[in-house]
Image: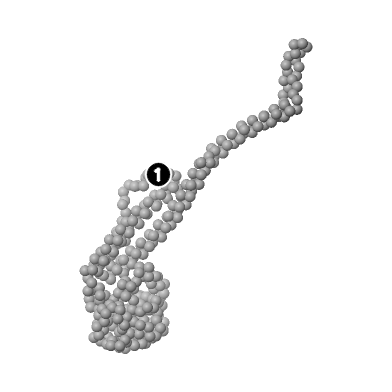
Amino acid sequence: MALNNYYYYDEQSCEFVPVKYNGLERIVYTACIWILCGVVLSGIGISILSFSVGTPAEIALKAENQELIDQLEQTKTKIKDLDQEVDQLAKADNEMYRSVLGMDEIPYDERQAGAGGADVYSEFDVYSQETSEILKWTAENLESLERSINIQQVSFNEIKSYYNSNREKMKHIPAIKPTEGIILSGFGMRYHPVLGYERQHEGLDFRANVGSEIFATGDGVVKYAGLKGTYGRLLIIDHEYGYESYYAHLSSFAKGIRPGTKVKRGDLIGFTGQSGMVEGPHLHYEVRRSSDPVDPLNFLFADTTPEEYMMYKEIVENNHRSMD
């Protein structure tokens, strides 16, 4: 920026004389002008930036809010996982525990019963839409999860009470795995490997080599021990209270096992084999209630955790081929 010329009146010469500046004064003046302009422009820029982006404190607050939102999203995922686990417990509770004990199932709608009514989370409306929606979802689902857990706890207490008051009956109900092998095939329509078509499979197939130990799944009396058609070597135990268990394709019976022999849950009763019409060595296991075949998977509750039950259930649902 050029330095303007200024004049002063010289009374002696009666004329205006230009003020003369030396080089240093010109440099100082020019620098001052540029510094002043820079300060003004910087102030304007900062004002505009603060208005559009925010102050450092506001920027830090926005970053903190975003981190909280990200954490809420992670919490949302964990809540969904927990909800699925509670649903699995509820299914095991209805299908395995309450069904086998002859107790009424708890309907799904009752397990999911909500509070209803007006919007009880309206206090979150003061926040941004994204934050408000996440907070409402989290609060609502946490409350629902808490209700489901409370209902499940009540159900387990009822089951425990029923069990304690029916101890003698519970000793007789077939309630453990008959052998150590994993389940290969389940109850229902299955493809028969020998006959070559689908037919009703009335039990569970357990993986086993020839000679694996087989145990009584409940107290009872041996009703049958011998050869029987496609079952091969078959053992039937009468558990009273309308329950029977079948153990098929055996290689041999344990010492002393014959019709009329009394057995306790966990007693050794025989050894696996491949007698009868089978694809290979395994144990075919059935549970019958009032002479009707029922799904034995629902009776493996004494030595099976809910997690193991769900694993076995997934196996039998995905395998549509039996061993016999």
Identify which amino acid the numbered label 1 is placed on: Asp
Residue at point 25% right, 73% down? 170
Q: To which residue does mark 1 refer? A: 125
Residue 244 makes an appearance in the image: no
Q: Quadrant of the N terminus?
A: top right
Above or below, 178 relative to 159:
below
Image-quadrant location for residue 53? top right
At mark 1, the secondary structure is: helix
Viewer-proximal residue among 160 and 155:
160
Residue 166 horizontal/vertical position (percent):
22, 70
Residue at point 35% right, 69% down? 305
Viewer-proximal residue among 61 and 77:
61
Q: Quadrant of the C terminus?
A: bottom left
Residue 115 makes an appearance in the image: yes
Coloured how? Answer: one colour
Dot 1 surroundings within 10 Å: few (below 14), some, or many (20 or more)? few
Give the side of residue 265 with respect to residue 8, left or right: left
Above or below, 75 relative to 221:
above
